[in-house]
Amino acid sequence: MNILQVEYLHWAPLFWLGIFIGLAVVVVIIGKLFFRNDYNTVDQQSLPFYSGTSNSLLQLITASSLYWGFKHTLDAYFLMIKRLFISDVEDFIQWFIIIVAGMLLILTGVLW
Amino acid sequence: MMYYFFLVISIALVITALLSIYFRDLLAAIVSYSVFSLVLTVLYFLLDAPDVAIAEAGIGAALTTCIFVIAIRMTRRREE
Amino acid sequence: MSAIVLYVTFILLLTIGIIALLFKRNLIKIVLAFNILDSGINLFFIALGYRENAMAPIFTPAPLDSVITMVLPTPQALILTNIVIGFATTALMLGVSVLTYRNNNTLDTRKLRGVEEYD
Amino acid sequence: MIKHVPVLLVAIPLLAAFMIPMIGMVNRTARTVVGVIALVMILAASYYIAGDILVHGRILYYMVGSSNPEMLTEHGLTFPIRIGLKIDPFSLFFIIMTTTLVLIFYVFSTQYIEENERKNYFTVLFITMVAGMMGLLVANDLFTFFVFLEILSISSAALVAFRTERKHPPYAGYKYMFVSAVATSFFLLGVAFLYAQYGSFNIDYLKEAIRGTLLDKIAIVLLIIPLAMKSGVVPMHMWIPDTYSEAPAPISAMVKLGSLICLYGLFRISFSFGMSHAHVSYPLGVLFIVFGILSMFVGVTQALVQKDVKRLMAFHAVSQVGYMLLGMGVGLTVVKSGDASFALFGKVAMIGGLLHVVNNALYKGLLFLTSGVMVRHFKTRNLDAMHGLAHYDVFTTVVFMIAALAISGIPPFNGFVSKIIIYESVFQYNPVLTLIAIFVSILTLASFMKVFYSAFLGMPSSRRPMEQPVLVKCSMFVLAVFIVVIGIYPQGILKAIIEPAVNALINF
Amino acid sequence: MRLLSVVAIVILFGFLFVGILHLHPVGEALGNSEVLQGRPELGIDINGVSTMDDYFLRNGQIETKSNNIVASVVFDYRGFDTLGEATVLFIVVSSISMLFFTFLKSKSIVSAGVPPAGQFPKIESRVITFGSFIMYIMILSFGVYLVVHGHISPGGGFQGGSVMASATALLLISFLITRHMQRTRKIFSFFESLGLTIFIGLGFAGITISFLYNFLAHTSTGFGRIIAFGPNQGYLISAGILPLLSLAVGIEVFFGLSLIVVTLFHVSGVKDTNSLR
């Protein structure tokens, strides 16, 4: 039994590694050939283009605003999670007792 | 005969346990726990476990109470 | 036979401990509740090894009868271990709660409520 | 000497731990070296027995204190009377993983934790923690298991509260100790129920004797759920982010390893007691799958919205446990079904789950170590305040990239291998589970993109760059090498260690 | 949520109640309840032995030469657990020292062990000091008796050690100990490590046969002297390595527990310089 014999491809990591290295070499060569070496690192070219603003504070998007759309969409879910797991000491034992009781009911077959 | 001993001691155990949970004054609760431990010691002795009884008397009744009192002294006496 | 009162006491102590863990909010009181819960389990172990009209498993004071009965020794040995472990747990928890009080100036779990992970 | 290895694995760290306070009074370097020697000795011992166990299929038994320690029962009895230790391929797999990783974390901590008199106690607790892990792994006796669980818990709790001068760590230590105390108390209750019926603590003996009565089922629940709580299964997971994030970085990795070892206990107990009857093993397996799916999903969605880098990684620790539970749960569900489904995919799922254990330990440890470096550089755990580490510290950047790509299941690294094995095998059980698992993997990648983006990219910070000590770099490098090697050549570890481990678990 | 947890408690309670009805009744523990006597000397007898405890009761005295079967279970049959348990105590002592490190290094002692005014009155009269000292010696000797006679009568390392440690609390009341705090802690810490090292050293001493092997019990002189089996008075020098292990554990438990209490008491009187408040 070859457990890594996947249905559509054979897992040959060295092959894939070779492809990765080859691609990297190709990218480096293309970069050396076609892109300019005298790329200006002093003036505004090095800074990220940010919708035309020149305010340097806005050039960094903070981590907490990175997936705001995702968060906003799933607001109901996150509020439920926050209400369920309040991360108190009594919260731990509460869930523990509930799970123990539920497992007892399921495993001993009282429910069916 | 032993049954009545067990009954009385069990009632005493439950009462002292309830009291030590009930008191909002932590010092009172701990004294109650100390009594609980002593009663438990007697019960262990009646259950023919003298080794456990000695250990419970030394650790449960004396030392646990001691460190609880010290901890209360470093914090505050009443539950808020 | 009717000494089932010991098992019932164990269940009552366990339930008292759990209820106190659930509804008490003082850190030191929680440690106390743990001790009660642990005592309940210790009592259960000792009650498991009890025999009526027997004697402690020590030969020194035993009568010179032809047949003597003794209670089981293993639960007693285990409970000796568990009592010391319980004391160790208690000491550590009390030490940490003292430090918590020093850093936060409260022992109430509601006031110590942790980091708000989602806003 | 090979027959004494099971007890030496526990006794050598304990001896070192007992001597360290006396040595530490004299010389601090000697104290560190004694710790290294003890850890290297158990590492060598574990590799020394590996060949014998894996190749020849020998199982090491050891009865502590018996006149013939390899004989299971004495004087013609039918049951063991002493404490039994046992090393079979399943525990050997965990032992090798633990001894290797623990040495790496110890080397990391020698230069990461600042040197003062307090480090004596740190070293003592670290070594006793290792002894607790080893005791858990070799124990074949439920009460010994309990005692070493307590050793592991108490030393971990004290180490979690190591930085007592800060605001939150003492309460985090309290939480850890609370969870451990709940878990161990109920575990002992389960042991009591089994002892009451069969009069023994030996796992092998109990496995033969167990009859599947009501009391047995209560006992199994009381044994399994505490261990599930200790390994952080949703919905009992909220203590994990609270404690992992407050501990120093090597301790976070060690505590993570400890919870994986609790997972070992969970698998061992559920496979030995639950497998005797199909009406226990099937619902148990289904519950494993449900818990696994819940852990994966809730863990990763909560991780995605974190701002605190260590909390984010701790939530990923929850999420990754779900994969292992999923793989092992599928195996447990079909193991007693009687048809060909076990040979078809159940065993492969279990292999994937076990491979994920070691992969997870590797990259999760590496991530925690890099997070320690990040936190030390930026003096904060808030991702919003971090930017531009890649400008100074190329080594940490590369290492973090390797770990992050591995945890997200990107091909050249080890995470991909175990994940694709789990996907392939679980797909044949139920395709929906695979879809959820892939979705969770995508979310994992998204959240690590966030960490990489905010901590490593961006403007260079004005803070002076700090050169990492050489041992810190070395330990991180070794972990990264392990990740890459297992990713490129997984067949070796699969054939040599994990397949015998799964066979031992099934025929246990 | 709260309601659900209450329901869960009720379910757990119900299951445990049904469970104990399925257990054997109290007072009729498993196994063969008779401990036979007058059997042929020096032979392990497994006739009718059906459980582990039966074996201990029937043959523990022969095999370990100790009259106290609990001691032989604690130190011989389950000695590894005892090692682990002594380790737990050691860990807690280290943890407390680590957690209160800044307190212990602090020079600003409010009052050596004496609480700030208004909490407890300062009791330091000669009667209390002298009386508690006398009591200390008496309790200490009782503890030593328990440790030394652990294999003959009820007692042993843990029990004697804990009794002795409870005497330390008396010294704290009389403020005899807090005046020499640093020295006391160092001495206690040293003896604690020493006790543990003796324990594990005795374990390693028998490693040619097995770890924690009771090698002395199989000689016929000294600690392995042949005792009369069945009810008897017992000898102080018997039972193999059990008295030595008991002594080591007694030292460890006494100094470990005392160190916990003493450290906490010392800390409670010290103002921490590193405080956040």
Image (cartoon, rainbow, N blue to C red):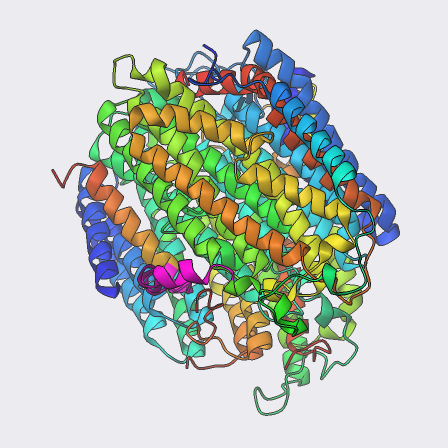
Instruction: Kindly give the residue lying farthest to the left in the view shown.
Output: A112
Left or right placement of residue D370 versus residue B79 in this view: right
Q: Is residue A71 magenta?
A: yes
Q: Nearer the viewer, residue E266 or D14?
A: D14
Residue at 66% across, 71% down: E171
Left of D210 or right of it: where is E193? right
Q: Quadrant of the N terminus of chain D?
A: top right
Residue D428 place in picture, x, y as percent: 32, 23
Quadrant where the C terminus of chain D is found in the figure: top left
Q: Which residue does the image show at 67% across and 46% down from the upper left?
A: D126
Seen from the viewer's position, the closer of residues E72 and D333 is: D333
**Outermost residue toward the top in this view:** D56
Q: What segment carries the magenta color? A: A66-91
Relative to residue C98, is residue D199 drawn left or right? left
* SS majority, magenta: helix
Q: Is A95 on the left or on the right of D412, as rendered? A: left
Q: Nearer the viewer, residue A40 or D363?
A: A40
Residue lying farthest to the bottom in this orientation: E118
Where E131 sits versus D189, above or below?
below
Q: Does residue D50 sit above or below D299 in this rendering?
A: above
Across and down, in percent, residue D69 comes to 58, 18
